[in-house]
Image (tube, helix red, strand yellow):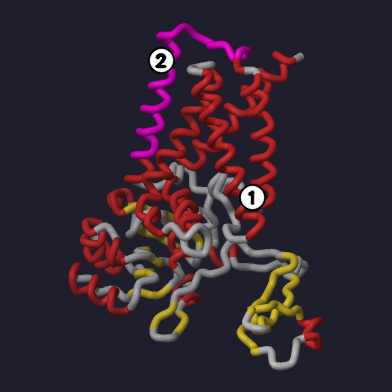
Amino acid sequence: MKNIITQFSRIFVGILFIISGLIKLNDPIGFSYKLAEYFSEPVFNMPFFVPLSLALAVFLVILEVVLGVMLLIGYKTKFTVWSLLLLIVMFTFLTFYSAYFNVVKDCGCFGDALKLTPWQSFTKDIVLLFFILILYFNQNLIKPLFNKTTQNVVFLGSIVLCAILGFVVLKHLPIIDFRPYKVGSNIQEGMLVPDDAEKSVVEMIFIYKVNGVNTEFAEKDLMNIPEGAEFVDRKDKVITEGYVPPIFDFTMEKDDSDYTSEFLEAPKTMLIVAYDLPNADKNGLAKMEKLYLEAKAKGYKVAGMTSSLPEEIDKAKKEFGLTFDFYFCDAITLKTIERANPSIVILNKGTVMQKAHHNDLSHLKL
């Protein structure tokens, strides 16, 4: 019985780590955004790690896949099990911290393929921790599947294949797009909220300084605020989260005017997405004016989309000779639309028809 439980744990943990790692390896930039969120000031306040987010993301997802393979084939069992145990302890801490303090809404464990709440992620990690502990206490039952030479080939091959996949998706786009802006999606439909959708329950919280200490009071407790307390702030506390549409923050604003409907209703629209112009790929930006003129000549409405400041927009337009207009949209939304900076999205009345990395402009069909 002990051997059966151990072998089941081995297969379960190995396959789950491989699947989780491959999903994130398909989109390491998306996972790097999650790591940057953990490193941000509101969470762990380690901004010096933010520039390393992408490198850490690639390393961690390849490590996940390779450790899963190593476990399945029984390669270097002691190192493999110890590594899995350390990883799952770290992940369990992060998901508990996210859930308890309500700071990171989605840990990104399965990328955009499967969204888990913080408590669901924590529960998943507790289950994995349980099975990894079984493996830890029964390492002697984990036997190699192949001879030493074959084991080495499989181990090294998994690293090489993962590295190739990571290089391909970083230089192009995710092979499988799980985001709400994938090809075939309609943006207007993605923003709709059903009439019978569950509504959020929100409670107003009032913050008063009482004897020098900021103290929170619910609306029903306002009569209990001590005399002389100083009002500091008011915030909304979400008691239960209602239905949130897949797309809820897509906007195209310029000079305090909203142009969203104008571009989404057009039969031929090209969006040049560059969420961060100062850090955008210079070679990519240098190609955009030629692409804009070509698209304009074929009847496309063309718009740049960015979250950059007006002075940053002016600087980029001057440096790269860009003559098309840029419209403002939230950076998180733009990073969700496309991972490359810059990249191209072709729309037909709000339906995503094509998406292209700036390295793949030759694949566009205008």
Q: Residue at x 43, y 11 (%)?
A: 150
Left or right, 222 with respect to 129, comes to: right
Q: Amino acid at mark 1?
A: Phe
Residue holding disc 1 = 96
Give the x, y percent position of residue 270: 37, 65
Query: Depth check: 220 or 298 in front?
Result: 220
- Label 1 or label 2, whichever comes before in sequence order: 1
Q: Residue at x 52, y 64 (%)?
A: 42
Q: Amino acid at mark 2?
A: Asn
Query: Depth check: 19 or 101 in front?
Result: 101
Give the x, y percent position of residue 69: 51, 24
Question: Which image quarter is the C terminus in?
Answer: bottom left
**Highlighted range, magenta:** 140-167
Mark 1 neighbour class, 10 Å CA radius: few under 14, some 14 to 19, many 20 or more: some
Left or right, 31 with respect to 297, comes to: right
Mark 1 and mark 2 in contact? Answer it, CB < 8 Å: no
- In front: label 1 or label 2: 1
Question: Which image quarter is the N terminus in?
Answer: top right
Q: Is residue 154 magenta?
A: yes
Mark 2 neighbour class, 10 Å CA radius: few under 14, some 14 to 19, many 20 or more: some
Q: Is residue 216 above or below residue 144?
A: below
Q: Give the label on residue 152, or none.
A: 2
Give the x, y percent position of residue 237: 69, 72
Query: Depth check: 57 or 216 in front?
Result: 216
Assign a secondary structure to mark 1.
helix
